[in-house]
Amino acid sequence: MKQLKNKAGEIIPFIGLGTFPFQGKVMADMVKSAVKVGYRLFDTADDYHGESGIGLARQELEKEGIVKREDLFIQTKISDNNATANEPLKAVYFNENSKFMQRHSVEEVVREKVSISLREMGTDYIDSLLIHYPFPGYYVDVWKTMIKLKAEGFVRYIGVSNFHEKHIETLIKETGVSPEINECYASPIATKQSLVDYCNQHDCLFVTYSPLMDITAGRIAAEKFQPLMVKYGKSLAQIILRWNIDRGCLPLPKTKNPSRLAENFNVFDFSLTTEEIDMISSLNCDYQYLVESKICPGI
Ligand SMILES: NC(=O)c1ccc[n+]([C@@H]2O[C@H](COP(=O)([O-])OP(=O)(O)OC[C@H]3O[C@@H](n4cnc5c(N)ncnc54)[C@H](OP(=O)(O)O)[C@@H]3O)[C@@H](O)[C@H]2O)c1
Protein backbone atom coordinates (compact mmCIF):
# COMPACT_ATOMS: atom_id res chain seq x y z
CA MET A 1 0.00 0.00 0.00
CA LYS A 2 1.47 3.36 -1.03
CA GLN A 3 1.94 5.67 1.95
CA LEU A 4 2.48 9.44 2.07
CA LYS A 5 5.24 11.11 4.07
CA ASN A 6 5.36 14.62 5.47
CA LYS A 7 8.42 16.78 4.93
CA ALA A 8 9.81 15.62 8.28
CA GLY A 9 10.01 12.16 6.66
CA GLU A 10 7.27 10.53 8.73
CA ILE A 11 4.48 8.39 7.25
CA ILE A 12 1.24 10.27 7.91
CA PRO A 13 -2.01 8.61 9.05
CA PHE A 14 -3.91 7.02 6.14
CA ILE A 15 -6.82 9.47 6.26
CA GLY A 16 -7.25 13.17 5.51
CA LEU A 17 -9.73 15.90 6.31
CA GLY A 18 -11.88 17.14 3.44
CA THR A 19 -12.14 20.87 4.00
CA PHE A 20 -14.70 22.15 1.49
CA PRO A 21 -16.54 24.52 2.13
CA PHE A 22 -14.77 25.80 5.26
CA GLN A 23 -13.19 29.24 5.06
CA GLY A 24 -11.43 31.74 7.31
CA LYS A 25 -11.68 31.22 11.07
CA VAL A 26 -14.14 28.32 10.72
CA MET A 27 -11.53 26.53 8.60
CA ALA A 28 -8.73 27.42 11.02
CA ASP A 29 -10.70 26.05 13.99
CA MET A 30 -11.59 22.81 12.14
CA VAL A 31 -7.97 22.25 11.09
CA LYS A 32 -6.69 22.93 14.61
CA SER A 33 -9.24 20.54 16.14
CA ALA A 34 -8.38 17.90 13.54
CA VAL A 35 -4.64 18.18 14.20
CA LYS A 36 -5.31 17.61 17.90
CA VAL A 37 -7.26 14.43 16.99
CA GLY A 38 -4.34 13.20 14.86
CA TYR A 39 -5.12 14.25 11.27
CA ARG A 40 -2.12 15.48 9.31
CA LEU A 41 -3.46 15.59 5.72
CA PHE A 42 -5.74 18.49 4.71
CA ASP A 43 -7.36 18.54 1.29
CA THR A 44 -8.22 21.88 -0.28
CA ALA A 45 -8.23 23.54 -3.72
CA ASP A 46 -7.62 27.01 -5.07
CA ASP A 47 -11.33 27.25 -5.93
CA TYR A 48 -12.52 26.22 -2.44
CA HIS A 49 -11.36 29.65 -1.19
CA GLY A 50 -10.25 28.09 2.07
CA GLU A 51 -6.48 28.12 1.70
CA SER A 52 -6.01 31.22 3.85
CA GLY A 53 -7.90 29.50 6.70
CA ILE A 54 -5.47 26.59 6.49
CA GLY A 55 -2.62 29.10 6.56
CA LEU A 56 -4.07 30.73 9.68
CA ALA A 57 -4.39 27.34 11.43
CA ARG A 58 -0.87 26.38 10.43
CA GLN A 59 0.61 29.57 11.90
CA GLU A 60 -1.38 29.29 15.15
CA LEU A 61 -0.49 25.60 15.56
CA GLU A 62 3.18 26.43 15.13
CA LYS A 63 2.98 29.39 17.54
CA GLU A 64 1.26 27.21 20.16
CA GLY A 65 3.99 24.56 19.72
CA ILE A 66 1.49 21.86 18.67
CA VAL A 67 2.88 20.97 15.24
CA LYS A 68 5.38 22.44 12.82
CA ARG A 69 4.78 23.01 9.11
CA GLU A 70 6.83 19.93 8.21
CA ASP A 71 4.55 17.69 10.33
CA LEU A 72 1.54 18.59 8.18
CA PHE A 73 0.59 17.44 4.70
CA ILE A 74 -1.32 20.07 2.73
CA GLN A 75 -2.88 19.10 -0.56
CA THR A 76 -4.29 21.69 -2.95
CA LYS A 77 -5.36 21.74 -6.59
CA ILE A 78 -5.10 23.64 -9.85
CA SER A 79 -8.67 24.45 -10.83
CA ASP A 80 -10.26 26.65 -13.40
CA ASN A 81 -12.14 29.71 -12.24
CA ASN A 82 -15.74 30.72 -12.59
CA ALA A 83 -16.85 27.65 -14.51
CA THR A 84 -20.17 26.29 -13.27
CA ALA A 85 -22.15 23.21 -14.22
CA ASN A 86 -24.62 25.45 -16.09
CA GLU A 87 -22.04 27.64 -17.77
CA PRO A 88 -18.93 25.52 -18.37
CA LEU A 89 -17.62 27.83 -21.08
CA LYS A 90 -17.20 30.59 -18.54
CA ALA A 91 -14.01 28.80 -17.60
CA VAL A 92 -11.34 31.48 -17.66
CA TYR A 93 -8.16 29.53 -18.28
CA PHE A 94 -8.30 25.99 -19.58
CA ASN A 95 -10.72 26.65 -22.41
CA GLU A 96 -9.90 27.09 -26.09
CA ASN A 97 -12.23 30.10 -26.38
CA SER A 98 -10.49 31.88 -23.53
CA LYS A 99 -9.25 35.34 -24.48
CA PHE A 100 -6.95 35.17 -21.47
CA MET A 101 -5.17 32.13 -22.88
CA GLN A 102 -4.46 33.98 -26.12
CA ARG A 103 -2.18 36.23 -24.07
CA HIS A 104 -0.75 33.82 -21.48
CA SER A 105 0.82 30.38 -21.52
CA VAL A 106 -0.43 27.45 -19.45
CA GLU A 107 2.89 27.54 -17.60
CA GLU A 108 2.34 31.20 -16.61
CA VAL A 109 -1.17 30.43 -15.34
CA VAL A 110 -0.10 27.39 -13.32
CA ARG A 111 2.87 29.20 -11.79
CA GLU A 112 0.68 32.17 -10.86
CA LYS A 113 -1.95 29.89 -9.31
CA VAL A 114 0.68 28.07 -7.27
CA SER A 115 2.24 31.31 -6.08
CA ILE A 116 -1.20 32.50 -4.90
CA SER A 117 -1.81 29.20 -3.07
CA LEU A 118 1.59 29.46 -1.37
CA ARG A 119 0.87 33.04 -0.32
CA GLU A 120 -2.64 32.21 0.95
CA MET A 121 -1.30 29.34 3.07
CA GLY A 122 1.78 31.25 4.22
CA THR A 123 4.14 28.49 3.19
CA ASP A 124 6.99 28.03 0.74
CA TYR A 125 6.00 24.55 -0.42
CA ILE A 126 2.89 22.47 -1.08
CA ASP A 127 2.97 18.83 -0.02
CA SER A 128 0.72 17.66 -2.81
CA LEU A 129 -0.55 19.52 -5.88
CA LEU A 130 -3.28 17.97 -8.06
CA ILE A 131 -4.91 18.94 -11.36
CA HIS A 132 -8.55 19.25 -10.31
CA TYR A 133 -10.00 17.90 -13.58
CA PRO A 134 -8.60 16.56 -16.87
CA PHE A 135 -9.20 19.86 -18.68
CA PRO A 136 -9.48 18.81 -22.35
CA GLY A 137 -6.59 20.06 -24.43
CA TYR A 138 -4.81 21.52 -21.39
CA TYR A 139 -4.10 18.87 -18.82
CA VAL A 140 -0.85 17.66 -20.40
CA ASP A 141 0.60 21.19 -20.41
CA VAL A 142 -0.55 21.75 -16.82
CA TRP A 143 1.17 18.47 -15.93
CA LYS A 144 4.44 19.52 -17.62
CA THR A 145 4.55 22.65 -15.45
CA MET A 146 3.77 20.64 -12.33
CA ILE A 147 6.72 18.36 -13.09
CA LYS A 148 8.95 21.46 -13.19
CA LEU A 149 7.47 22.82 -9.94
CA LYS A 150 8.28 19.55 -8.22
CA ALA A 151 11.86 19.61 -9.55
CA GLU A 152 12.20 23.21 -8.28
CA GLY A 153 11.06 22.17 -4.77
CA PHE A 154 7.78 24.10 -4.61
CA VAL A 155 5.78 20.87 -4.53
CA ARG A 156 6.60 17.47 -2.96
CA TYR A 157 4.02 15.18 -4.63
CA ILE A 158 2.21 15.79 -7.92
CA GLY A 159 -1.05 14.13 -8.85
CA VAL A 160 -4.43 14.38 -10.48
CA SER A 161 -8.11 14.34 -9.60
CA ASN A 162 -11.11 12.95 -11.49
CA PHE A 163 -8.75 11.26 -13.95
CA HIS A 164 -9.61 8.02 -15.73
CA GLU A 165 -7.07 5.47 -16.96
CA LYS A 166 -6.99 7.06 -20.44
CA HIS A 167 -6.00 10.46 -19.04
CA ILE A 168 -3.20 8.95 -16.94
CA GLU A 169 -2.03 6.92 -19.94
CA THR A 170 -1.78 10.17 -21.93
CA LEU A 171 0.28 11.86 -19.19
CA ILE A 172 2.68 8.92 -19.08
CA LYS A 173 2.95 8.78 -22.89
CA GLU A 174 3.57 12.54 -23.21
CA THR A 175 5.90 13.08 -20.24
CA GLY A 176 7.04 9.70 -18.92
CA VAL A 177 5.88 10.82 -15.45
CA SER A 178 3.00 9.03 -13.73
CA PRO A 179 0.86 10.85 -11.14
CA GLU A 180 1.59 9.93 -7.54
CA ILE A 181 -2.04 10.50 -6.43
CA ASN A 182 -5.45 10.30 -8.13
CA GLU A 183 -8.27 11.83 -6.05
CA CYS A 184 -11.69 10.53 -7.13
CA TYR A 185 -15.12 9.77 -5.75
CA ALA A 186 -15.61 6.18 -4.61
CA SER A 187 -18.08 4.47 -2.33
CA PRO A 188 -19.51 0.98 -1.70
CA ILE A 189 -22.01 1.81 -4.48
CA ALA A 190 -19.23 3.13 -6.76
CA THR A 191 -16.14 1.01 -6.11
CA LYS A 192 -14.19 2.11 -9.23
CA GLN A 193 -12.29 -1.16 -8.81
CA SER A 194 -10.62 -1.14 -12.25
CA LEU A 195 -9.35 2.42 -11.71
CA VAL A 196 -8.16 1.53 -8.19
CA ASP A 197 -6.30 -1.52 -9.61
CA TYR A 198 -4.81 0.60 -12.39
CA CYS A 199 -3.60 3.23 -9.87
CA ASN A 200 -2.08 0.55 -7.64
CA GLN A 201 -0.21 -0.93 -10.62
CA HIS A 202 1.22 2.53 -11.38
CA ASP A 203 2.26 3.32 -7.78
CA CYS A 204 -0.42 6.02 -7.79
CA LEU A 205 -2.33 6.39 -4.51
CA PHE A 206 -6.12 6.39 -4.95
CA VAL A 207 -7.48 9.09 -2.63
CA THR A 208 -11.24 8.94 -2.07
CA TYR A 209 -13.27 12.13 -1.98
CA SER A 210 -16.84 12.23 -0.65
CA PRO A 211 -16.36 8.83 1.05
CA LEU A 212 -19.39 9.38 3.33
CA MET A 213 -21.68 11.39 1.09
CA ASP A 214 -23.79 8.37 0.20
CA ILE A 215 -24.62 7.88 3.90
CA THR A 216 -25.83 11.48 4.14
CA ALA A 217 -27.88 11.05 0.96
CA GLY A 218 -29.47 7.81 2.22
CA ARG A 219 -28.06 5.76 -0.64
CA ILE A 220 -26.30 3.18 1.55
CA ALA A 221 -28.28 0.12 2.67
CA ALA A 222 -27.32 0.46 6.34
CA GLU A 223 -28.87 -2.89 7.32
CA LYS A 224 -26.21 -4.70 5.23
CA PHE A 225 -23.55 -3.18 7.48
CA GLN A 226 -25.28 -3.95 10.78
CA PRO A 227 -23.45 -7.26 11.47
CA LEU A 228 -20.07 -5.57 10.89
CA MET A 229 -21.02 -2.59 13.06
CA VAL A 230 -21.93 -4.99 15.89
CA LYS A 231 -18.87 -7.24 15.36
CA TYR A 232 -16.39 -4.35 15.49
CA GLY A 233 -18.37 -1.92 17.68
CA LYS A 234 -18.05 0.75 14.98
CA SER A 235 -20.42 3.15 13.23
CA LEU A 236 -21.49 2.88 9.59
CA ALA A 237 -19.14 5.74 8.70
CA GLN A 238 -16.21 4.01 10.42
CA ILE A 239 -16.87 0.73 8.57
CA ILE A 240 -16.96 2.54 5.22
CA LEU A 241 -13.79 4.49 5.99
CA ARG A 242 -12.06 1.24 7.01
CA TRP A 243 -13.27 -0.45 3.80
CA ASN A 244 -11.47 2.35 1.92
CA ILE A 245 -8.29 1.89 3.91
CA ASP A 246 -8.32 -1.92 3.60
CA ARG A 247 -8.55 -1.66 -0.19
CA GLY A 248 -5.61 0.78 -0.26
CA CYS A 249 -7.64 3.99 -0.78
CA LEU A 250 -6.95 6.99 1.47
CA PRO A 251 -10.31 8.56 2.41
CA LEU A 252 -11.00 12.30 2.85
CA PRO A 253 -14.09 12.59 5.06
CA LYS A 254 -15.36 16.09 5.77
CA THR A 255 -17.38 17.02 8.83
CA LYS A 256 -18.39 20.29 10.42
CA ASN A 257 -19.10 18.40 13.64
CA PRO A 258 -16.06 18.21 16.00
CA SER A 259 -17.20 14.94 17.60
CA ARG A 260 -17.30 13.32 14.16
CA LEU A 261 -13.71 14.41 13.56
CA ALA A 262 -12.68 11.94 16.25
CA GLU A 263 -15.17 9.27 15.14
CA ASN A 264 -13.88 9.37 11.56
CA PHE A 265 -10.26 9.18 12.69
CA ASN A 266 -10.91 6.28 15.06
CA VAL A 267 -10.54 3.57 12.41
CA PHE A 268 -7.04 2.29 13.02
CA ASP A 269 -7.80 -0.28 15.74
CA PHE A 270 -9.54 -2.84 13.53
CA SER A 271 -9.49 -4.17 9.98
CA LEU A 272 -11.95 -5.98 7.76
CA THR A 273 -11.44 -9.50 6.43
CA THR A 274 -11.16 -10.14 2.70
CA GLU A 275 -14.70 -11.59 2.72
CA GLU A 276 -16.04 -8.47 4.47
CA ILE A 277 -14.29 -6.16 2.00
CA ASP A 278 -15.76 -8.20 -0.87
CA MET A 279 -19.26 -8.13 0.67
CA ILE A 280 -19.15 -4.31 0.86
CA SER A 281 -17.72 -4.05 -2.67
CA SER A 282 -20.55 -6.27 -3.94
CA LEU A 283 -22.95 -3.34 -3.31
CA ASN A 284 -21.36 -1.59 -6.30
CA CYS A 285 -23.76 -0.27 -8.95
CA ASP A 286 -21.33 2.21 -10.57
CA TYR A 287 -23.21 5.12 -9.01
CA GLN A 288 -21.95 8.60 -9.94
CA TYR A 289 -23.22 11.28 -7.58
CA LEU A 290 -21.88 14.31 -9.38
CA VAL A 291 -20.70 15.07 -12.84
CA GLU A 292 -16.99 14.45 -12.60
CA SER A 293 -15.94 17.60 -14.31
CA LYS A 294 -17.65 20.93 -14.68
CA ILE A 295 -15.58 21.55 -17.79
CA CYS A 296 -15.71 18.16 -19.45
CA PRO A 297 -18.91 16.40 -18.36
CA GLY A 298 -19.37 12.78 -19.21
CA ILE A 299 -15.68 11.91 -19.45
N1 LIG B 1 -11.44 16.48 -6.13
C1 LIG B 1 -12.73 16.73 -6.27
O1 LIG B 1 -13.24 16.94 -7.39
C2 LIG B 1 -13.59 16.75 -5.03
C3 LIG B 1 -15.01 16.75 -5.16
C4 LIG B 1 -15.77 16.73 -3.97
C5 LIG B 1 -15.14 16.70 -2.73
N2 LIG B 1 -13.77 16.73 -2.64
C6 LIG B 1 -13.06 16.70 -1.33
O2 LIG B 1 -13.58 15.64 -0.53
C7 LIG B 1 -14.01 16.18 0.71
C8 LIG B 1 -15.16 15.37 1.27
O3 LIG B 1 -16.21 15.33 0.36
P1 LIG B 1 -17.70 15.72 0.73
O4 LIG B 1 -17.74 16.79 1.74
O5 LIG B 1 -18.36 15.91 -0.57
O6 LIG B 1 -18.28 14.36 1.30
P2 LIG B 1 -18.07 13.44 2.61
O7 LIG B 1 -16.98 13.90 3.44
O8 LIG B 1 -18.09 12.07 2.12
O9 LIG B 1 -19.47 13.63 3.30
C9 LIG B 1 -19.75 14.74 4.03
C10 LIG B 1 -21.10 14.47 4.68
O10 LIG B 1 -20.97 13.34 5.57
C11 LIG B 1 -21.38 13.72 6.86
N3 LIG B 1 -20.57 12.99 7.83
C12 LIG B 1 -19.28 13.21 8.17
N4 LIG B 1 -18.88 12.33 9.11
C13 LIG B 1 -19.94 11.53 9.36
C14 LIG B 1 -20.17 10.44 10.24
N5 LIG B 1 -19.20 9.98 11.05
N6 LIG B 1 -21.39 9.85 10.24
C15 LIG B 1 -22.35 10.28 9.41
N7 LIG B 1 -22.22 11.30 8.56
C16 LIG B 1 -21.01 11.93 8.53
C17 LIG B 1 -21.19 15.21 6.92
O11 LIG B 1 -22.07 15.81 7.83
P3 LIG B 1 -21.52 16.84 8.99
O12 LIG B 1 -20.62 17.83 8.32
O13 LIG B 1 -22.80 17.42 9.51
O14 LIG B 1 -20.81 15.97 9.98
C18 LIG B 1 -21.55 15.64 5.49
O15 LIG B 1 -22.96 15.75 5.35
C19 LIG B 1 -14.34 17.64 0.41
O16 LIG B 1 -14.34 18.41 1.57
C20 LIG B 1 -13.20 17.98 -0.53
O17 LIG B 1 -12.02 18.20 0.24
C21 LIG B 1 -13.00 16.73 -3.78
Image (cartoon, helix red, strand yellow):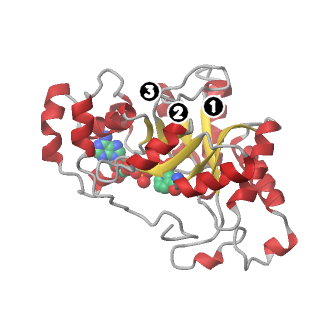
Which residue bears the numbered disc 2? 32
Task: Pick the residue in front: 189 or 127.
Answer: 189
The image's mark for residue 60 is: 1
Please say whether residue 116 is visible from this viewpoint: no
> Looking at the picture, which amino acid does disc 2 mark?
Lys
| Residue 255 % position (x, y) | 40, 45
Q: CA distance from mark 1 to mark 2?
A: 8 Å
Label 2 near label 1: C-beta < 8 Å?
yes
Q: Is residue 168 visible?
A: yes
> Which residue is outermost to the right?
103
Query: Could you tell me which secondary element the residue under label 3 belongs to?
Result: helix
Give the distance between the C-alpha atoms of the residues marked 1 and 3, in whole angstroms.
16 Å
- On whether ligand 1 comes within 8 Å of the CB at mark 1, the answer is no
Q: Nearer the viewer, residue 254 or 245?
A: 245
Closer to viewer: mark 2 or mark 3:
3
| Position in image of residue 192 (x %, y %) | 39, 50
Instruction: Give the mark, 1 or 2, whose residue is nearer the N terminus.
Output: 2
Give the residue displayed 32% in from the left and 20% down from the top.
Answer: 269
The one of 137 and 11 positioned closer to us in this rendering: 137
Tell me the residue that label 3 is attached to: 37
Q: Is residue 265 above or below residue 83?
A: above
In the image, residue 265 sits, relative to residue 66, either above or below, namely: below
Give the amino acid at mark 3: Val
Front-lying residue, 126 or 122: 126
Q: Amino acid at mark 1?
A: Glu
